[in-house]
Image (spheres, rainbow, N blue to C red):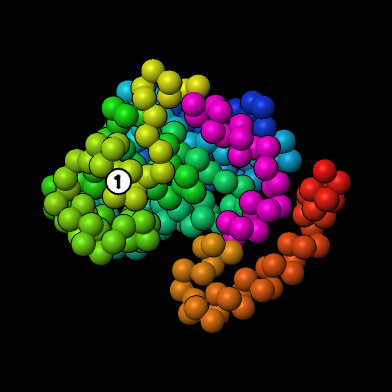
């Protein structure tokens, strides 16, 4: 496994645990930690030991979003420098969407701005009941521009406007009710329930999950007819995988 400065990457029981490790900065994102995340995710994707990837934060918070000291420096740089820096984060979100393996966010504390976007870019989001989510960019005159691509796919138009344009703080229960996250877990049970959740996913067919994830996100911009046609093609491909053949045989042998 690669060695990283600002994250911790470890494999336990078929799970790739990726931990943001800048607790003194509330795990704020700069180009170094974004690049390290991309490297760790790529490593997990190609490792046959890993069935599921978990993203979490060290310390009190999941992630406070962009490192504002870094943004202040970049405000004096050229537009091309700023586009290059922003593109790093966009590439990370795209990479997460294209990974064949499922990525689960385990959120505690606060997930703010780009940190909320990073969490909700994961395929599943489980949050401690005491956690909170907020797109705080507008409060400093900034725009939640890149993370909007994820938020708009998770939320209705009215909810997206409300959350992105007011910077309101959402409790974990609010975030679940709005459809921003999947699951709220009581704090005292958080670590053990996350382990149970990802262990269950790790026992499922990797090929079935990879093909399902790929098709699900490909249908975002398809018409109904195009989505059905893609479904037909994927249905035929899935029937031919060893996992599907074995699963059908086991079911019929019962």
Q: Residue furthest top?
A: 188
| Front in this rendered view, residue 22 or 184 | 184
| Front in this rendered view, residue 212 or 81 | 212
Q: Is residue 72 visible?
A: no
Residue under label 1? 177
Number of marks present in the image shown = 1
Magenta stretch contains residue 240:
no
Does 222 sit left or right of 142 as displayed?
right
Q: State the image coordinates of residue 80 (x, y, percent, origin top left).
A: 34, 63
Work out whether 180 lies above or below 60.
Answer: below
Residue drawn 17% across the image and 55% down it: 162
Q: Name the image quarter holding the N terminus.
A: top right
Q: Name the image quarter holding the C terminus.
A: top right
| Front in this rendered view, residue 129 or 102 | 129
Q: Is residue 232 visible?
A: yes
Which region of the structure is painted magenta? 193-214
The quarter of the picture where residue 12 lies is top right
């Amino acid at each position: 496994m690669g060695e990283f400065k600002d994250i911790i990457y470890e494999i336990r029981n078929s799970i790739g645990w990726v931990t943001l490790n800048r607790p003194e900065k509330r795990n704020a994102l700069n180009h170094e930690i974004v690049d390290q995340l991309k490297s760790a995710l790529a490593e997990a994707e190609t490792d046959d030991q890993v069935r599921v990837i978990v993203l979490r934060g060290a310390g009190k918070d999941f992630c406070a979003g962009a490192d504002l000291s870094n943004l202040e420096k970049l405000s004096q740089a050229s537009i091309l420098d700023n586009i290059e820096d922003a593109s790093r984060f966009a590439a990370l979100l795209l990479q997460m969407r294209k990974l064949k393996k499922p990525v689960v966010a385990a959120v505690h504390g606060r997930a703010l701005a780009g940190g909320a976007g990073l969490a909700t870019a994961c395929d599943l989001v489980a949050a401690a009941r005491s956690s909170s989510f907020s797109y705080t960019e507008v409060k400093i005159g900034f725009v939640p521009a890149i993370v909007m691509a994820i938020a708009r796919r998770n939320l209705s138009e009215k909810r997206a406007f409300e959350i992105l344009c007011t910077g309101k703080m959402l409790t974990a229960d609010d975030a679940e009710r709005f459809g921003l996250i999947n699951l709220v877990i009581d704090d005292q049970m958080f670590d053990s329930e996350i382990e149970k959740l990802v262990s269950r996913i790790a026992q499922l067919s990797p090929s079935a999950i990879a093909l399902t994830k790929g098709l699900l996100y490909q249908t975002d911009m398809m018409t109904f007819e195009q989505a059905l046609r893609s479904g037909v093609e994927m249905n035929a491909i899935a029937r031919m995988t060893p996992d599907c053949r074995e699963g059908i045989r086991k079911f019929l042998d019962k």
